[in-house]
Structure formats: C-alpha cells, structure tokens
Amino acid sequence: MNSQSMQPSTAAEPLTLALLAAALHRRRALLVWPFALLTLASGLLCFLSTPRYRATTEIQVQKVESGAFGLQSTVTGIPEVPASGDSLDFNLTLQTEASILRSPALAVAVIKAAHLEPTPDYFAPVARGGGLVPQWLHLGSPLEPLSTPLEQAPNRRAVAEKIFKAHLKVQPVTGTRLLDISYSDPDPARAALVANTIAQSLGDLTFEQQFNATLRSSHWLEAQLEDLRVRAEQATSRAAQLQRGTGVYGDDASRNVVLERLDSLNQALTAAENNRLLKESIDQVAANGSPELISSLSGNSSTGTVASINTSLTLLQGMRQQEAQALAELSQDRVRYGPAYPKIAEEQAQLSDIESSISNETKRLGERAHTDWLVAAKQEQGARSAFEAQKKLATRQNDSVIAYQLAKQEADNSRELYESLLSKLKQASLLQGLHANNLSVVSAAQVPDTRHPTSPNIPLWLASGAIAGLFLGAGIAAYRELTDDTIYSLAQVERVIGAPLLGIVPVAGPTGSERRSMGRLLAQLGKYLSISDAGYAPLLPPSVIHDLQSPGFREGIGSLRTALQIVDAGSTSRIVLVTSALPKEGKTTIALDLAKLFSQGGSRVLLVDANLRNPALHVLAQAEQVHGLAMALSGPRRVPATAQFTHAPSLDVLAGSEIASAPLDLLSSPRLAELLKEWRWSYDLVVLDAPAVLPSSDALLLAKQSDSVLLVVRHKHTTHQALARSLEALQCHGSTRGAIGVVLNDVALDSQAFHAHFGYPGGGYAAQVS
C-alpha cells in the first residue's frame, strides 16, 4: 500500500488463450444474442419459404469427329483430332457448351417450349387486381402483357431470362465428358419437364448451327469459283508466252544447257581453289626451311594427293630418324667413353653427313612445292575466267527464266486452288445433311422425390444462420472488447497501479437465488429506495439495509478492514481518506460500512462527509443533524456536533446536507488542520468520505492531511485512463503522509475478477460466507 512503490505500467498484456477465454466469457451476451436471433431468423425463413424441387438431366459432349463419310478434314483443311486429344481443348468445349446453356437465346427457346410464362415463378396472374407477380425485378418500365410475343416484349423477356438463369444450374462433371443440367421449380413434374426441354433445345440449336455453317461455306465457295477459273486461265496463257522467249524447253525450267555448264564450271573452280590453297600452304611450310615443320606434313592426309611431295616427305622423315638414332648413339658413347675416344669423331662425322643430306633435301622440297603452287594458281585463274564468262551468259537469260517460273507457278497455284475449291464445294453440298450431333442424353430428368425438396435446405440454412450469428457476435464482442477501456480484471488494475490490490468488494445487492426470492419484497419496497453515488440510499431501518446486503459484500468489507489493520499496524490514531476517480463508484457505501465494521470491533470511529459539493452521507447514514463539515469549517471555532450511529454505539457521523459555495477555500483553511488534530486525539479512526479526484481538487487537498488514502475503483465502470490519472494526481499533488490503496468495488460474484481473487466461483463463495 506504499504510494512510493506504485509504478503505473502502460505495457500491453500479451494475448493468451486464457485472456481470450475470459474475454469471450465477459462478452457472452454479445455472442448469444446474434447467434439466437440469426438462428431464429433462419428457422423462420425455412418455415416461410416455398418448397422447391430440382430435376437433373445428364448429357454427354463428344469430340467433333469427321462427317459420315470421312470428308470433314478434307473440307476444312484441318487434320482430324482423335477423341483422346488435348484435355485442355476438350475442357474448353465443355465450358463452351455450358455457356450456351446459359445463353439468352436458349433461355427464350425453353421458356416458349415449356410454356413457363404463366407459371408462379414467372408471370402467373394475380387472383385480384391482375398484373404480374415479379414486376419488382424490372423497375425501369412496366412489363408488357402476356398476349405480346416474348420476342417482341424486351422488358418481359429480360425479366424472364433473369428468372430462368436464377433457377438453372449447369455443372460439368469433373474428369468426364458429362454435363449436369438442373432446374428447380415448385412443381416437381415441371422441373423434370424443363430440364429435359433444355437438353433437347441444346441439341436442336447445335444441329441448326452446324447446318447453317455448312450452307454458308457452300455459298461462299460458289462465289469464289468463277473468279478463280478466269484467273487460272489468264495465268496459264501468260506462262506459255514467257516460255517461248526464254529458250527453255520442257516442263522443268531449271534444266537447260547454260545452267548445267555454269554448274560444272563452278565445281571446277572450287576444285582449283582447293588445290591452289593446298599447294600454297605446302610452299609456305617448305619456305620456312624447318625440317621439323616439313616432316610434320607427312602425317597430314591432305598432302597425299601430291605424289612428288609425298615421296620427298617420306625420304625426309627417314633421314630424320637416322639423325635421331646417330645423335642418341653419340650421346651414349660420350657418357660411356668420354670425348677423346676415337669412335666419337667417327660418329660426329656421320651425324654431320646426315644433317647435310637433310638440309639439301629440304631445299629441293621447297623448290618443288613453289613450282607446284605456281602451276595451281594458273589453273585456278583459268577456271575462274571460264566461270565468269558462263555466269554473264546465264545472267542475261536469268530475268526471262525467273519471269517464266513465276508465271508458271502462279498458273499452277490458281489451277490447284480452283480444283480444290470445286472438290470441296461438291463435298460440302453432300455434308449439309450428314453432320452428326456431338450431344447425347445419358440420363433424362425424372420427377424428383416430393418428400425431400432441395430448397429450403433446413440443416444448411440453420447451420449458416448459426455460424453467421457466431461470427457476427464474435465481431461485435471483439469490437466491444477493443473499444472498452473500463476495468474488468484484477490484472488490469495491478498493471495500471504497478502494485497489488488492497482488496475487492463484491456487489452490495442480493445475487442469484437471493435476488429471485427477494423479488417480491424489493417490488413492494421499491417506492422507498433511491439510487445515488452511495449505491442504495434507502429510507429504511439499518437492519433492513443490512439484510439486503449480500454476504459477499459484507465479507469484502471485512477483508478490507483486515488489510488496513495489517498495513497500519502499530498506529493508534489515523485518518483514512476514501475517494474514487469518478463519481458513482460506491465510495460512500464503502466508507460507511468500513467505519461501522471498525466501530463494531471496539474502536472509536468518526465518519465525516467531506464532499462539500454533493453531500450524500447524511441520506445513507440517516444522520439527524442538518449541518456538516462545511458549517464546522466556516462556523465558530468549536468542535462540531456529531451524530451517533444507532446500530454502532462507538461510531459518530459528521454529515450535513448543505452545499458549500467555496469548497476549495474551506478545505485550504487552517480550521481543517485544527479539526483533524482534535479528531486524532478523540477517535481511534477518522474516515473522510471525499469527492472524486478527477472532477475537482478537493480530494487532493484532503489527501495532504490524511494518513492513508483508499482509492475506490468500480468494476466495469472505471476506465484505465481515469484510474491512471487519479493515481498520478494523488501521488504527485496529493502528497499523502502514508499510503495509497486501491479497492476494486462492485465485483460480480460470477465474474473472472472475483474468481481470480478468491480462487472459486461466486456460488461457492456465497455458500461459505452465508
């Protein structure tokens, strides 16, 4: 209870499952009401809804195959795709058919074929007053009468299409070529009729579209044939005229003497270039004079075509081997016998002869290679001259030949296109009536079971309403929890004040079975009761007031008295200030009951109503005097008269009904200090019932001259901000001599705060204290 140890904390409490459960328990009413209301609304909607029945037709969508005689790919020019083709492509086919089923054209056809307009879902006449039932669907303009054809009534047609699409359901069966076509209607027989009519209308529409497409293709082919025939004849005539001026004979324009000779000369020129390049590379290697490089040519396959060079290379390579052998023997003998050995000179002379032979053969090979290169260069020059001359001759004929080839190709293409279109025209005429429908009915719709309508789905609707109610309630509870700044748990108070609570006081009125059993008594005595900041301010005898108080409240006051005695042990006389952060938090009731309890223990107690702005203690304590602390501070310097509490002989009460005009001046006067000093000598305990801290500074002035301060916090009423500000004001500006203790008041017996403090629910507590 030491004011110095209270360190307010602003850290947010971490979210745990226990905190979440506690929050749900606190806001359970916000969860239950939306849940109950939406569940009840769902049940009422199920009861009022008209039963509907759904019938389903199952159709199979096959791949579009070729015509009956295998002519489809010939007509379209597109290769046939086997039935087991691309699954993505077939999925697109299924989706296309599903979209056609939802199309306005098919809807109008089915509405007319099944005579749906006079039915209750559409435009059934009203029993009285005429008109049409679903006119609210089309608010733009009035609907046309039923006597007008549907195609000529745009407003009625638009409404009918909306109704039809709302009752139609098309669902591809996953992994198959099947489509489920479902239709719902209040009449089960009509639902089956409409589902079968939709499948039949889809087949008729598909066949009609295929027939019309083939017919349009035939007409287009006929229009193109005459123009193609004239163009083909003109192209053939022009090609024949150009052929006569080119000198080309026969059908193959690429085969003529000039081009054949040019081709052979080109091959000769290529061979001469290759030969010259070979001879030139050999000459460059031989000109280098390096026996190593020259001898390496012997392993090159390109030199095998030059006989003279190949022979010289073979001879040179043999000499190189002899040289290597002689050099090896010379090195061995030098190591074995030394340089002065006679055989060394002989071997040295033999090695010199071999090297001289290699050098001479290298020179002869270079001269021979150079001569070969000159001859090859002259041969290349001659081949090039002949090729260029033939090329000029071919160039002169090239323009005429190209023009002829283009004209001949154009004539051939025109003739082939004409013949192809003529053949396709004949085939298309044959295929007009041979297209097979790719739709087939697998399972026709049957009249559904009248005992089990598809709508309303009572379990689903009730479950949806219940779940929606839970989510709505959870949302409201979460919003209320996040926006509620009031204090509802012990942990919140202790986190704000930074110290343990001094005690908690349960609700003062009867609870549970007591409240139910005393209902009649409270109803009869209600005219005698009034509510104020003190809680109940009855005009009843104190014994009746005591009986109306719950056992939990009396036990809470007793625990608070014990806590004060432990904290202030050893003090013979003290002044206790009872205040709160805001009005209406029950501080007057706690001050009165605490004073009574101390007096019952044998202590001389004075209870002073220090609320000079709105005094209420005189009503609750039923004090007889008219003047209170205000008169004592502003009147003559004498000890003010006090009233003795009837049921507590050692309890005196100083309470009046007058409202002071300048309470701050009175509480700041030296007279208050004199009175408190006198009271310290006269009484064991002085309890000051002060006004709230935040609305005025009266409580701060009284706190400066008090030994202890009890700050009353009302459960689910006081906010965190009010508690923190009042505590800060008392610590910073009140300058109390002793300590500041916080009391949590008006705690419900079934609350989490009560359970956290006492360790068992309120029912068990009531049973133990009763």
Image: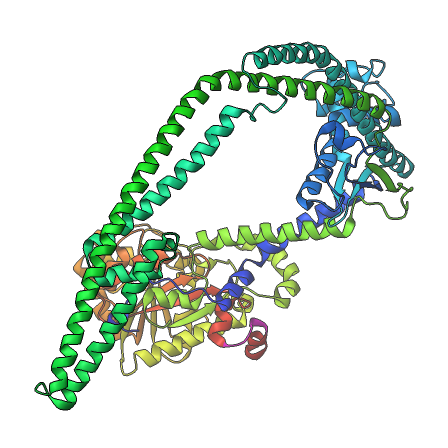
Q: Position of residue 393 (x, y in %)?
A: 43, 20
Looking at the picture, tell me which residue is in the foreground, 708 or 575. Answer: 708
Q: Position of residue 75 (x, y in %)?
A: 75, 27
In magenta segment, residue 760: yes
Q: Quadrant of residue 764?
A: bottom right
Residue 485 x %, y %: 42, 55
Where residue 196 sits in the image (x, y, percent)?
87, 35
- Would you say residue 45 is visible in this rendering? yes
Quadrant of residue 91 in the image?
top right
At 38% from the left and 26% from the top, the residue drawn is: 388
Q: Is residue 592 left or right of residue 186?
A: left
- Main SS of the magenta segment? loop
Q: Nearer the viewer, residue 102 or 124?
A: 102
Residue range (magenta): 759-763
**Residue nearer the viewer, 132 or 305:** 305
Task: Point out the image quarter for the N terminus.
Answer: bottom left
The correct choice, above or below, for 331 with respect to 191 in the image is below
> Residue drawn 27% across and 42% down?
374
